[in-house]
Image (cartoon, helix red, strand yellow):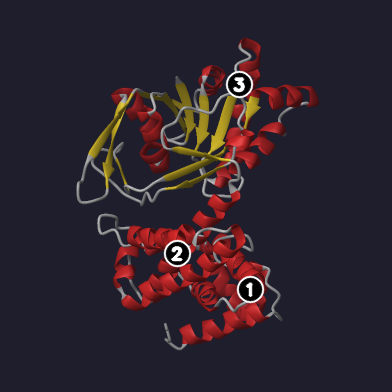
Amino acid sequence: MLAVHFGAGNIGRGFIGNLLYHSGYEICFVDVNSEIVDLLNEKREYRVGIADHSQDELVIKNVRAINSQKNMDQVVEAIAQADLVTAAVGPNILPHIAGAIAEGLRKRIQTTDKPLNIIACENMIGGSTFLKEKVYEKLNEEEKEVFNQRFGFPDAAVDRIVPNQSHEDKLKVTVEPFYEWAVDQTKIVGEKPPVEGITFVDDLNPYIERKLFTVNTGHAVAAYLGYYAGIPTINEAMEKEEIRTLVEKTLQETGMLLVKKYGFDMKKHQEYISKIMNRFSNPYISDEVTRVGRSPIRKLGPNDRLVSPAKQFASVVGERPVYLAKSIAAALMYDYPQDKEAVEIQESIQKNGLESTIEHYTKIDRKSDLAALIVEQYELLKNKQLI
């Protein structure tokens, strides 16, 4: 079996490639990083370290790579022959790989009628659906009809912490032990890909929001409060009692929302929260708060990890989301000078005022109770009142 995977970065090698290899696939990575591509083709294997007390290492074999900038014809041929196509390139890069996928699928139609599924493993809602839209922009109406019969773009929710890292062996990746990969089986064409580690579900939304409003929300809160407190890494921030308490209280709010919205079992969800908190505290992973907190404009978006649960909490639970509001305030205070989005937000606050800035980036009405609560929490943080 051949899997073509776009993105030979840490997530691609340490998470997706790892599972594909252990499921029996040959893996063809597609990337623009010449050094990584050349090393993969030279060694045909790489190591994955597990960030826990065991310090175990796995060797991922049967791999090769194609430089998509230099050898697009090889990428097209690989897709035409593939049994599965996956991607972990980042949401902004998905449109840039759509052309190669479209050409590969066109060639595939000429040689076989075997179905193929393309799964975007991105930290976004509807990643595969978005990729499909970009692929279909390259097609005519007749091609779209054929593609609909032959090719599936099932959405996925993925979760594994893979921090920034550097090793003498440039192919080595260190990952946390925990992972989750859920795939919407209702959008699969043909048989389900035989990947050990995928959970196939009929409704992906509960999994997406559970992950987004627990892992991503909690991670962001630890990052922004850690930065506020002058702490460099996530695990060190979680050692500070006040920050750990605030992260947990924020996740209690998102938990109330998720339980009420999707009917999750409260006890099991509390266990999930505890597991996530322990992941953030993993002493074997040193993840910088500035990496986790980067791009605050995106993280303050109306459908993202902080604002979306805050708005939903107010309407679904019917209470004031005090800790989510504090988290939004902490994100608004994030003034890391090497982050362009952080600089832009600070300039907006200075030029246009806090209320206007909140409305502009979060789309929360400045006259709403939620906006007033965010302003209240912002002033508390500004006056050095963390709790």
Q: Is residue 146 above or below residue 93?
A: above
Residue at mark 3 to residue at mark 2: CA–CA distance: 39 Å
Compare residues 40 and 52 and report the one nearer the observer: 52
Badges 3 and 1: C-beta atoms under 8 Å apart? Answer: no
* Type of amino acid at the residue the image marks with label 1: Ala
Q: Looking at the image, which residue is at 63% across and 35% down? A: 187
Q: Quadrant of the C terminus?
A: bottom left
Horizontal relation, residue 281 to residue 221: left or right: left
Residue at mark 1 to residue at mark 2: CA–CA distance: 19 Å
- Residue designated by label 3: 115
Which of the numbered marks, if any, corresponds to residue 218?
2
Residue 317: where, in percent of width, then height?
61, 72
CA neighbours of label 2 inside 10 A, class few (<14), some (14 to 19), many (20+)? many
Any part of residue 102 in sight: no
Query: If you read the primary sequence from the N terminus, does the residue marked by circle 3 or circle 1 appear first?
Result: 3
* Type of amino acid at the residue the image marks with label 2: Gly
Badges 1 and 2: C-beta atoms under 8 Å apart? Answer: no
Q: Looking at the image, which residue is at 33% across and 68% down? A: 238
Residue 240: where, in percent of width, then height?
31, 74
Q: Secondary structure at mark 2?
A: helix
* Type of amino acid at the residue the image marks with label 3: Pro
Q: Looking at the image, which residue is at 56% across and 24% down? A: 191
Q: Secondary structure at mark 3?
A: loop
Q: Is residue 257 above or below residue 76?
A: below
Horizontal relation, residue 69 to residue 313: left or right: left
Q: Residue furthest left?
A: 54
- Residue designated by label 1: 314
